[in-house]
């Protein structure tokens, strides 16, 4: 992991800064619209797919940024690890922190106090859904380097369906339905499919609960703070 | 050692007609290559194949002895590709030197600023707001500061003003030590005719010509006469005189631009080079 910090910093200055600022901005607007925490996070999650989609587009078209990225003398596995790290840790952290920001603002404006309570199962559901989606895109992008758009989308769809079938067989819908109800709002309107997928993972997460959700959140906030401090310390040096 | 070795390369985009079929080519250390060819001949595609951004359908493209498509860090650390198209990030030049330089083991920050100074100072502002020429200067400074053993430049003179072009020629000559190979793909032949020592001309998916300028000068001559030379491989009338490419030793420095025009227009000249077998010399 010789070049991890450099690659991460490069990505921060290229894209992540704007995803972070954009995520918080959208969350605040949605918060003002009082759409609810789950919906804010769900919407941000869907918007976050623009990040891996952009990579797919860049790889496919060998665009300037992709070619420049390819020619960097760093192993492909290390390059992929950094992007994977961003997709699985940084992006969800941005979504959740932004979601909190939006929801807190809405609480203060509409209720005059912060009365926020977090459902751990929902959090797990969204987080795992994002991980699965970003994973599908990461796998898709590997194929995208060699195959046509249609073939790649086909491979991704098959992978997605496979996960969904496994999920459907394993799922106890009676146990999951309450979680499904909790996740109404904008996300439901945007993507019923994502929602059902999230519901499945929410079911998986039912072993955890609210305490786990707070621990998870504390870890992500701690991590995001630590990594930002560390990266900037390096560039200043 | 060859910086790049291409054997039996076949490549095409999608299901379209292959762009290259059975292409063989070498780029060796100690030379400045001019990669020439008409629009659509595949110059940029070939450069992308060399750095591993595109994959051959068959055949081999070796970069410093390793398959380019594997994108191994070792050969890439010795190679720099200056692209023609720009989408520079909104970074200041100092941040570019900081973020970019760390990946290249021989990167010299001092050289980065020295090259910028020589090409014409650029402000310490986000480069995405710069003019095309200023962006080019920053990119050239990044490229030369890496001290790469293989420097690939796609249209490096594009957008530069006249003093900067002159300075860039000097910088390239300074960079061209015996352990380095430089490939310049360009249409601006007047900028490189005194710079390159080897010409590679792509035509119809093949290397029509790969020869040192010295060998070319001993193979063809460009003459001017009131009468059209009988042995002309290519000729055109300019201001009442005939200007022609004829077989024989050159009596004056080679006019690359005229040779380029001749190669694109004259079947006879193309056949001449095919028959003389000076490819891969």
Image (cartoon, coloured by chain):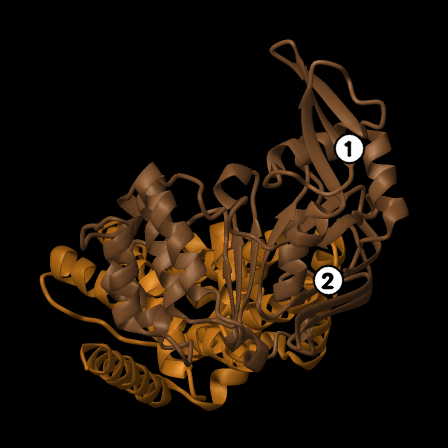
Q: What's the residue at 52%, 72% (across, down)?
A: B149
Where in the figure is residue B162, as x and y percent of width and height?
A: 34, 37
Report in which chain the residue with disc 2 lies.
A
| A24, B15: nearer the viewer | B15
| B69, B227: nearer the viewer | B227
Where in the figure is residue A126, as x and y percent of width and height?
A: 46, 71
Q: Quadrant of residue B118?
A: bottom left
Do the CB atoms of the residues marked 1 and 2 lie less than 8 Å apart?
no
Residue topped by disc 1: B246
Q: Is residue A24 visible?
A: no
Identity of the residue furthest to the right in this view: B275
Task: Identify the disc placed on residue A146.
Answer: 2
Q: What's the residue at 56%, 52% (across, down)?
A: B196
Q: Quadrant of residue B11?
A: bottom right
Q: Colour of chain B?
A: brown
Q: Is residue B75 above or below residue B265?
A: below
**Marks 1 and 2, Cα distance to the nearest angstrom?**
46 Å
| B35, A87: nearer the viewer | B35
Task: Identify the disc placed on residue B126.
Answer: none
Local secondary structure at mark 1: strand
Taking B175 as reference, is B128 left or right?
left
Mark 1: few, some, or many residues within 10 Å (few <14, many ≥20)? many
Where in the figure is residue A92, as x and y percent of width and height?
A: 39, 72
Q: Colour of chain A?
A: orange
Q: Quadrant of residue B69?
A: bottom right
Where in the figure is residue B37, as x and y percent of width and height?
A: 68, 41
Which quadrant holds the N terminus of chain A?
bottom left
Q: Is residue B158 above or below residue A143?
A: above
| A220, A127: nearer the viewer | A220
The tally of labels here is 2
Which quadrant holds the C terminus of chain A?
bottom left
């Amino acid at each position: 992991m010789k070049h991890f910090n450099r690659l991460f910093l490069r990505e921060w200055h290229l894209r992540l800064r704007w995803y972070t600022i954009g995520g918080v901005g959208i969350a605040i607007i949605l918060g003002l619209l009082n759409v609810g925490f789950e919906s804010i996070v769900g919407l941000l999650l869907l918007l976050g797919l623009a990040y891996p989609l952009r990579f797919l587009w860049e790889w496919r078209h060998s665009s300037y940024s992709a070619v420049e990225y390819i020619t960097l003398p760093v192993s492909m596995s290390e390059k992929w690890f950094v992007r994977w790290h961003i997709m699985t840790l940084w992006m969800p952290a941005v979504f959740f922190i932004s979601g909190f920001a939006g929801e807190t603002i809405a609480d203060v404006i509409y209720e005059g106090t912060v009365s926020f309570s977090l459902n751990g199962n929902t959090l797990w559901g969204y987080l795992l859904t994002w991980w699965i989606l970003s994973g599908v895109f990461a796998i898709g992008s590997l194929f995208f380097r060699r195959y046509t758009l249609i073939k790649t989308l086909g491979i991704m769809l098959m992978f997605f369906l496979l996960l969904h079938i496994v999920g459907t067989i394993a799922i106890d819908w009676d146990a999951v339905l309450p979680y499904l109800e909790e996740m109404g709002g904008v996300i439901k309107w945007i993507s019923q499919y994502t929602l059902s997928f999230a519901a499945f993972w929410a079911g998986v997460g039912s072993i955890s609960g609210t305490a786990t959700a707070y621990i998870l959140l504390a870890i992500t906030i701690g991590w995001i703070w630590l990594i930002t401090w560390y990266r900037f310390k390096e560039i200043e040096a | 050692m060859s910086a790049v070795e291409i054997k039996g390369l076949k490549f095409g985009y999608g299901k379209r007609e292959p762009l290259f079929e059975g292409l063989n080519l070498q780029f060796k250390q100690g030379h400045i290559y001019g990669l020439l060819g008409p629009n659509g001949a595949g110059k940029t595609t070939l450069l992308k194949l060399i750095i591993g951004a595109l994959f051959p359908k068959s055949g081999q493209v070796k970069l410093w002895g390793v398959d380019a498509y594997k994108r191994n860090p070792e050969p890439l650390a010795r190679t720099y590709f200056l692209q023609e198209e720009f989408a520079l990030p909104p970074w200041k030049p100092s941040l570019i030197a900081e973020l970019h330089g760390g990946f290249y083991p021989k990167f010299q920050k001092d050289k980065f600023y020295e090259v910028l100074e020589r090409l014409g100072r650029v402000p310490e502002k986000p480069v995405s707001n710069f003019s095309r020429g200023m962006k080019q200067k920053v990119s050239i400074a990044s490229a030369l500061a890496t001290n790469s053993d293989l420097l690939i430049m796609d249209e490096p003179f594009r957008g530069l003003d006249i003093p900067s072009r002159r300075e860039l020629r000097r910088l390239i000559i300074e960079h061209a030590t015996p352990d380095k190979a430089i490939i310049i793909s360009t249409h601006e032949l007047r900028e490189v005719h005194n710079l390159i020592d080897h010409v590679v001309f792509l035509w119809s998916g093949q290397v029509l010509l790969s020869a040192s300028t010295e060998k070319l000068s001993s193979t063809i001559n460009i003459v001017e006469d009131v009468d059209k030379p009988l042995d002309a491989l290519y000729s055109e009338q300019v201001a009442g005189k005939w200007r022609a490419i004829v077989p024989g030793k050159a009596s004056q420095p080679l006019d690359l631009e005229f040779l380029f025009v001749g190669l694109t227009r004259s079947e006879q000249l193309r056949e001449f080079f095919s028959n003389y077998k000076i490819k891969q010399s």
